[in-house]
Image: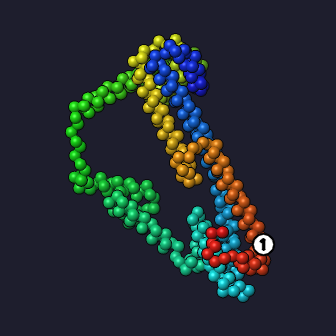
Amino acid sequence: MTNISSEMVHVLASMDTNTLTKAQQIFQKRIREVDQKRQALAAWEKWLATYHDTLTQVLIPLGRTYNVLKTAIILRFDSVYLDSIFSKTDKRKFEEIIGSMAADILATEETETVKALYNKYNNADYDAECLEEKANFKGMISDLFGAELNPDINDDTEDWLRQIHASMAADPEAGEEREAPAEKSAKALAKEAKDKAAEKQISQSIRDVYRQLAKELHPDTEQDPVERDRKTLLMQQVNEAYKKRELLTLLELQLEIAQLDRDTLETMSDARLKHFNQILKDQCLELQNEIANREFFFREKFHMSPYQRLSPEYVRRRFQTEIDELETHVESLQRDLLAFKNTQNIKQWVKGYRLGDSGR
């Protein structure tokens, strides 16, 4: 389907605001809001595709190169650790540098070579530390949810949560601890009945639009093969939009096949528009939640404040900065590795290193 949201907005904008009823004015507003949020979501989806491509094709390979170079450097340091030109202080520096750099590498990629260096210079057992850390985390999760985790369960956090959920569901006392639901008041029951009736009317409104489209587009009634194919494609879009309760998409399809025009919108009853407005409001909230989910991913990744305004372009710049910084680190490590072929250069570099400065 051609994207005609702008055409729908244009049709609505051409209507004289001064003569519109309140329901028509709200309908105008809702259509614009949904259209804007669909465009915003489309921009995030486009950026996400670019982000994942860049991540797999650029950042991950660059990260591996970074780890390879750091591994080569700590192996070089390890090879000269016992060299007589290095003092006891130099050796303590080596222990701190190699131990820290090995931990840095293992945080993103585990190799037996780096594990061995980590264990040697930290006087530790990396695998045992990991097991202890996982056991502590499982214990924390168990305490938090009040359920025991199977000690043989794998390291997938989702599996842990599924087991906790199953354990809590199977606990016969769990139901007893829940408070019995309070009896609903007459007012609450009346509101519930009203909400159900409104939902039924909303569903009927969507169904009416769907039926109008299906009547016009059903391919079985079309004799021309080309037109049948066009209607088949449109009907697939109608079915998908109806399934997702996407009223704006259904209205756009009506506009595309000339079932909906300015005159139809102007003469549509307020009662019908009221149902449409609620549908569009719900759709707007769903779109906003989808946008918020996309934003949350990047807020977490780049440690951004939940109150900071976010856009795909801003995230793109932050991501590019991360790539640029990693490229700079890789170039620096390449120069260092070349210089460290000369043991005297290592001696000079270690001399300038201060103990406790492992974060440099």
Which residue has dot 1 on it?
339
Where is residue 214 drawn, in percent x and y? 47, 20
> Image point 66% across, 55% down: which residue?
322
**Residue 360 visible in the picture:** yes
Quarter placement of the N terminus:
top right
Q: Secondary structure at mark 1?
A: helix
The image shows residue 28, relative to residue 52, as above or below, that is: above
Q: Quadrant of residue 223?
A: top right
The image shows residue 249, relative to residue 335, as above or below, that is: above
> Image point 30% across, 52% down: which residue?
169
The image shows residue 17, relative to residue 314, as above or below, that is: above
> Image point 56% across, 22% down: which residue?
8
Quarter placement of the C terminus:
bottom right
The image shows residue 196, relative to residue 68, as above or below, that is: above
> Image point 39% across, 61% down: which residue?
141
**Residue 218 visible in the picture:** no
Where is residue 308 drawn, in percent x and y? 56, 46
As drawn, which residue projects farthest toward the front? 18
- Left or right side of 348 for 187: left
Q: Nearer the viewer, residue 52 or 320?
A: 320
Q: Nearer the viewer, residue 146 or 170?
A: 146
Where is residue 52 drawn, in percent x and y? 61, 48
Inspect the image, locate mark 1, and give the three-letter code of the amino acid beneath it.
Answer: Ala
Q: Nearer the viewer, residue 319 or 217?
A: 319
Total of numbered circles in the picture? Answer: 1
Q: Badge 1: few (under 14), some or many (20 or more) residues near its Cα, within 10 Å?
A: some
- Left or right side of 263 for 334: right
Where is residue 274 drawn, in percent x and y? 41, 22
